[in-house]
């Protein structure tokens, strides 16, 4: 470890003190009784830390390829974080999947719960919850006054989430948390007071969003090209030609749907449509699981099986990474996501499913590929083994660096890889993978199209509203026509795209760049190329922007 690693390691310690919520997310101990300062001063302090560390990095010359990669990765991430801060993304960033509110709420999902100290930390955070939300309101008010508010529609949707989280007949999140803890004595009373305070604060925040902030929100949900270009670069860690990528999205979706039609004939027979194949699969009782808990257990079994079979054959999976925990999220937001292990692996990597209310039947053919995406060889392998690489990666690389295009691109690449490795021979499972890929390709089209308000090509392969300009309404119509998920899930998906510009395309565009990186490595090494070795070397670099990734791979 050299000076760049020393700077990075010091950064983690200072960052954790400024972001105790973030420290819990990445598994750094010692901060679980506090929440982030979400006031304007709190955001400014974290931005100032980034500036100081960037200045320190500028003065250090890397002494090895590994140091060069670490410097490239850190400069790229911190510079973009500062650029987004300067552009007012703090105020523009309230959406249905991520915001200061969501970070405060979901941190409780990752906190230790066993023992008096752990429960006392939860009580302390519940007690600070109203203060933190008050700070966040101040930040959002200042941003709105500066013309940097989120879209009105997003603010109203998040207000609805607040309603659901505190509804005794809905998620009833904070009181449900305390009931699950089962604490006794004085601590039980403190926890119940905290739950009541946090519930009231969340309800008040929903009122604030609905009655005060939403009237100041942007009428148009489209981000515009300037904001979108910055968001796209941040989520990918690479600059891409947005207009070329938009056109490629149509080509990729058409290619995938051609594949899907071919698989449909294997399921139903010659001339069958994809919708007929989907209907046949959904009607197959052997491919349906009833009940959330039973579905969670099915995911766990498949995730464990993948780890067992891939270890020693296609990957060398460290012992600590052999454990993954499949969980049902305590909210009903409709999201599927992965959270990494703590630094000491006392908290394992986890696959979460926030099942929408009213959904109780689950089609396994749709979700085999989801397990591979979130588990192994997807996020769990990628993230958890990075946490272990203390001998080659500094603490910032192991714990704090996350680039959506790198991570989500790898996970989508992992789905295709499982097909290459023979794990999707069942035509239903393969159709599920292709349908998931088609969803991600449709995202590229709709996300870029809606936020840049582009014209729909006159010669698009689907004959979809040629020559018209994208709107949220057309986005819904297009996604509904090309994606086979429930309306509840799809509505959440579309709201997510509209409120989080640039993130949704990072899956498919990230996969595209991963595939190109593999092709480049094959071209460089010729007959000596080894796929298992390529995966090992690429993942050993940790998460980094896709432009720094390509440069790092070229140095290997």
Image: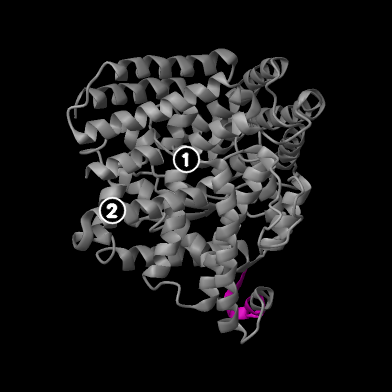
Numbered range of the magenta stretch: 280-290
Q: Which residue lies furthest to the front in this view?
A: 459
Say which residue appears at 45% left-offset and 52% top-offset.
512
Whether residue 37 appears in this view of the structure is: no
Place of residue 95 in the rendered image (x, y in percent of width and height, measured from the top left): 66, 36
SS label for mark 1 = helix
- Please tell me which residue lies in front, 247 or 350: 247
Say which residue appears at 22% left-offset and 22% top-offset.
61
Say which residue appears at 67% left-offset and 77% top-offset.
273
Instruction: Give whichever of discs 1 and 2 has the lower sequence position.
Output: 1
- Please tell me which residue lies in front, 232 or 503: 232
Disc 1 crowd rating (10 Å Cα; few below 14, some 14-19, many 20+) is: many
Q: Main secondary structure of the magenta part?
A: helix
SS label for mark 2 = helix
Disc 2 crowd rating (10 Å Cα; few below 14, some 14-19, many 20+) is: some
In which image quadrant can residue 421 be found?
bottom left
Q: Would residue 356 be counted in the magenta stretch?
A: no
Query: Is 12 situated left or right of 432 in this image?
Result: left
Say which residue appears at 50% left-offset and 38% top-offset.
235
Place of residue 317 in the rendered image (x, y in percent of width and height, measured from the top left): 28, 56
In which image quadrant can residue 481 be found?
bottom right
* Quadrant of the frame with the N terminus: top left
State the mark number for residue 521.
Answer: 2
- Please tell me which residue lies in front, 519 or 340: 519
Distance (Cα) linking label 1 and label 2:
20 Å
Depth check, mark 1 against mark 2: the one in front is 2
Q: Establish if 230 lies above or below 341.
A: above
Q: Establish if 291 lies above or below 507.
A: below
- Please tell me which residue lies in front, 554 or 286: 554
Residue matched to label 1: 236
Place of residue 284 in the rendered image (x, y in percent of width and height, measured from the top left): 63, 80
Whether residue 195 appears in this view of the structure is: yes
């Amino acid at each position: 470890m050299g000076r760049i690693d020393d700077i990075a390691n010091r950064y983690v310690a200072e960052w954790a003190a400024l972001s105790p919520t973030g420290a819990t997310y990445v598994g750094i101990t010692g901060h679980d009784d506090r929440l982030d300062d979400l006031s304007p001063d709190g955001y400014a302090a974290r931005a100032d830390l980034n500036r100081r560390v960037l200045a320190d990095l500028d003065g250090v010359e890397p002494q090895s390829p590994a140091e060069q990669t670490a410097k490239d990765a850190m400069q790229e991430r911190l510079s973009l974080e500062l650029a987004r801060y300067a552009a007012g993304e703090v105020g523009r960033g309230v959406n249905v999947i991520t915001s200061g509110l969501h970070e405060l709420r979901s941190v409780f999902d990752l906190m230790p719960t066993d023992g008096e100290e752990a429960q006392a930390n939860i009580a302390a955070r519940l007690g600070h919850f109203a203060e933190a939300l008050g700070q966040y309101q101040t930040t959002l008010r200042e941003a709105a006054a500066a013309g940097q508010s989120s879209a009105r529609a997003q603010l109203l949707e998040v207000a609805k989430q607040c309603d659901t989280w505190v509804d005794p007949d809905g998620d009833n999140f904070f009181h449900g948390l305390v009931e699950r803890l089962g604490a006794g004595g004085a601590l039980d009373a403190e926890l119940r007071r905290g739950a009541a305070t946090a519930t009231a604060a969340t309800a008040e925040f929903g009122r604030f969003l609905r009655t005060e902030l939403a009237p100041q929100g942007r009428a148009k949900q489209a981000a515009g090209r300037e904001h979108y270009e910055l968001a796209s670069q941040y989520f990918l860690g690479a600059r891409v030609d947005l207009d070329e990528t938009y056109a490629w999205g149509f080509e990729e979706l058409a290619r995938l749907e051609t594949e899907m039609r071919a698989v449909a004939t294997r399921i139903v027979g010659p001339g069958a449509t994809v919708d007929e194949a989907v209907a046949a699969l959904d009607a197959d009782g052997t491919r349906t699981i009833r009940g959330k808990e039973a579905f969670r257990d099915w995911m766990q079994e498949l995730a464990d099986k993948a780890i067992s079979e891939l270890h020693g054959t296609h990957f060398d999976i460290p012992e600590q990474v052999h454990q993954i925990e499949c969980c049902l999220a305590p909210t009903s937001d409709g999201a599927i996501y992965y959270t990494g292990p703590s630094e000491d692996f006392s908290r394992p990597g986890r696959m979460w499913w926030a099942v929408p209310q009213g959904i109780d039947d689950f089609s396994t053919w749709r979700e085999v590929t989801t397990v591979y995406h979130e588990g192994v060889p997807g996020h769990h392998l990628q993230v958890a083994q990075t946490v272990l690489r203390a001998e080659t990666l500094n603490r910032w690389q192991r714990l704090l660096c996350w680039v959506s295009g790198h991570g989500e691109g790898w996970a989508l690449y992992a789905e295709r890889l499982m097909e290459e490795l023979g794990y999707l021979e069942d035509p239903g499972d393969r159709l599920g993978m292709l349908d998931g890929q088609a969803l991600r390709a449709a995202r590229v089209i709709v996300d870029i199209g809606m936020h840049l308000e582009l014209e729909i090509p006159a010669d698009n392969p689907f004959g979809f509203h040629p020559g018209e300009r994208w709107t949220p309404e057309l986005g819904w119509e297009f996604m509904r026509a090309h994606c086979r998920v429930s309306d509840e899930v799809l509505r959440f998906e579309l709201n997510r795209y509209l409120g989080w510009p640039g993130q949704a395309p990072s899956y498919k565009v990230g996969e595209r760049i991963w595939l190109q990186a593999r092709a480049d490595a094959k071209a460089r090494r010729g007959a000596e190329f080894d796929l298992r070795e390529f995966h090992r070397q690429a993942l050993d670099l940790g998460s980094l922007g896709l432009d720094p990734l390509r440069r790092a791979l070229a140095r290997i």
